[in-house]
Amino acid sequence: MGISLKLDPTFYPSAKEAMKAKPEDLAYVACLYEGTGVKKPDFIAVVDVNPRSPTYSKVIGKIDLPYVGDELHHFGWNACSSSLCPNGKPGLERRYLVVPGLRSSRIYIIDVKENPTNPRIVKVIEPEEVKEKTGYTRLHTVHCGPDGIYISAFGNTEGEGPGGILILDHYSFEVLGRWEIDRGDQYLAYDFWWNLPNGFLVSSEWAVPNTIEDGLRIEHLKDRYGNRIHFWDLNKRKKMHSLSLGEENRMALELRPLHDPTKMMGFINMVVSLKDLSSSIWLWFNEEGKWRSEKVIEIPAEPGEGLPEILKPFKVIPPLVTDIDVSLDDKFLFVSCWGTGEVRKYDISNPFKPVLVGIVKLGGIGKKDSNALGLTLTGGPQMLEVSRDGKRIYVTNSLYSTWDNQFYPEGLRGWMIKIDSDERFNIDKDFYVDFGDARSHQTRLRGGDASSDSYCYP
Amino acid sequence: MHLPTLIAILSSGMIDGIDVYKGGLFSLYFKRVGDEFRALISPLFYTLMECLPCVVAFWLWNDFSRPEIIILSGTLLSYAIMRIPVDKYIHYVGDVKPTLRGLAKWSWVNSLLCMDFIPPVIFLLIGKGYFLAFLIGNITFRYLAYKINVRILRINFSALFSLIIAITAVIILF
């Protein structure tokens, strides 16, 4: 409760101003043992990402969680630039990581201010409290809102739907309850984000926990995986509209609105097409008050060898676009193809017509060749995190424990690779983090990154 | 008018006015989206909403005796001391839609919640000239903040405001 005469210097009114922030020096990475056979608690690794530091590219700290089996996945900050929105909450600071366990539904609050390389847990919200106050379980996306911390959940206490969003208090981290007041026919949940000054929230669909937790079953693809996005009135907490993104497509995952809030549009990745196993990226946008969508990128499946059991009937390697990220200047879209082992860079100066401007190859299904690092990588590029200035992309390789084991049955060692993205688009040969038996999922950069903050100003 | 009191009250108005969390973020948004009219009236609008309870105080005004001045000063000091630890916790966000209606609604709600109307009301009660000094300092610095607000986003003017109010209360007392 100390009084400071300074406000948080990592908050910026607009994404363009945030791009001028000094480069990140530390990265926090969610690492998990679930699915590996190792009975150890998951941890948050602290990675040195300052190229001038003698410990560059090394894990210089970690915090082990007290329980086994949380399955760390996504996480976020307690506060961010949304605090600077008109009528935002004064006095907030980016100090705590809010880290949910996807499988356990437990939430850890981790203080990284006192000692950034040696964070400590200051609060654990047990799953029982989450269930009792919200009825939700399996917690996923964390966004720092102007009035609270928002976390999406895949399902209810029985592992079925509906999934939704819950809110935590900014200061006490109390679970305040469900966010939705009128959800209409929304049942499936996954990611969400918003456009704060225009007062809308958009959410996406994967599947309920009972469908995904034991692995992907091909027969479920037809009717148990979602292909819609939902638009909500952020203030009335009411669903206003839904869009189906192609009848043949399944798994509407990562929502990436443009950072300029005057542009009411964004991208989403559809992981798989039932027709040909291709992946696609769609642009959703508001035109004269109506929500519309358009497929702007399609990435085909590739013929391949050495396929895992789950893909043998199809005889092809699907691209499996499982993460996308937009640079803060809204000029580039980064796409990870977890199946075919590519990170792609698209110029989205015209968001309706993205232009492919770079590809980096990193592992992939059935790929045994070494890359620019001289290493044969296990797994493929999965989570992407883009630095605020858009010049560095951090890539990790785990998707979801049971799915990792299906698509990469030979085993998957967690790694983190950095791609330089200025004039060129290539791997930083001096940066490679090996997490050993642990798998690596989301990365958060100290001070903020391209998917952590929401901005209210152009 | 007592010169040290006048300077202290003028400074309070200035510090309150330059706090971008008090309406300045609305004008920043309007300015960035090219809505110059709303950007220009927002600072004035916020001061008017904050000082609205002064309309009531205006009718209560009379020549206060020394014991009454001590009570007013004590109230001001209590307000300042209580504000320091709780200020950031009692802000109600509601929504962050940048509209004049939102500005009016949330500035009114938050000035009531934080009891930010207390200083201007007390300044009016101890003298209309003092209240005028507060208003002048407040509005002038709201417009100054409107011009430079991105550069002052890093300073916690709310904490400074509590400090200057506490000092003002002590000066009024003596």
Image (cartoon, coloured by chain):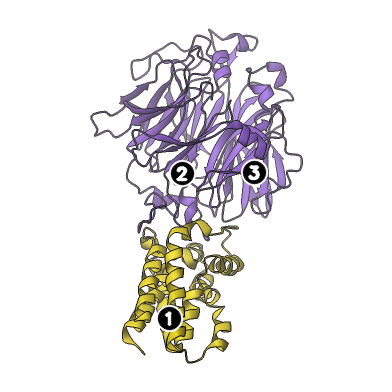
Chain colours: A purple, B yellow
From the viewer's perspective, is the residue at label 3 or at label 1 nearer? Answer: 1
Asked whether disc 3 touches disc 1, contact meaning CB atoms under 8 Å apart, the reply is no
Asked whether disc 3 touches disc 2, contact meaning CB atoms under 8 Å apart, the reply is no
Distance from Cα at disc 3 to Cα at disc 2: 37 Å
Q: Which residue is mark 2?
A: A331
Query: Is residue A275 visible from the viewing direction of this image?
Result: no
Q: Nearer the viewer, residue B122 or A401?
A: B122
Is A82 located above or below residue A417 in the figure?
Answer: below
Amino acid type of the residue that numbered disc 1 sits on in the rendered structure: Ile
**Residue lying at 58% horizontally and 13% vertically, measured from the top left:** A406
Q: How many callouts does the rendering have?
A: 3
**Residue lying at 51% horizontally and 55% vertically, measured from the top left:** A456
Distance from Cα at disc 3 to Cα at disc 1: 46 Å
Q: Residue furthest right?
A: A185
Is A102 located above or below residue A219 in the figure?
Answer: below
**Residue lying at 60% horizontally and 8% vertically, measured from the top left:** A309
Q: Which residue is mark 1?
A: B70
Q: Secondary structure at mark 1?
A: helix
Q: Which residue is mark 3?
A: A177
Asked whether disc 2 touches disc 1, contact meaning CB atoms under 8 Å apart, the reply is no
Identify the subunit bearing mark 3. A
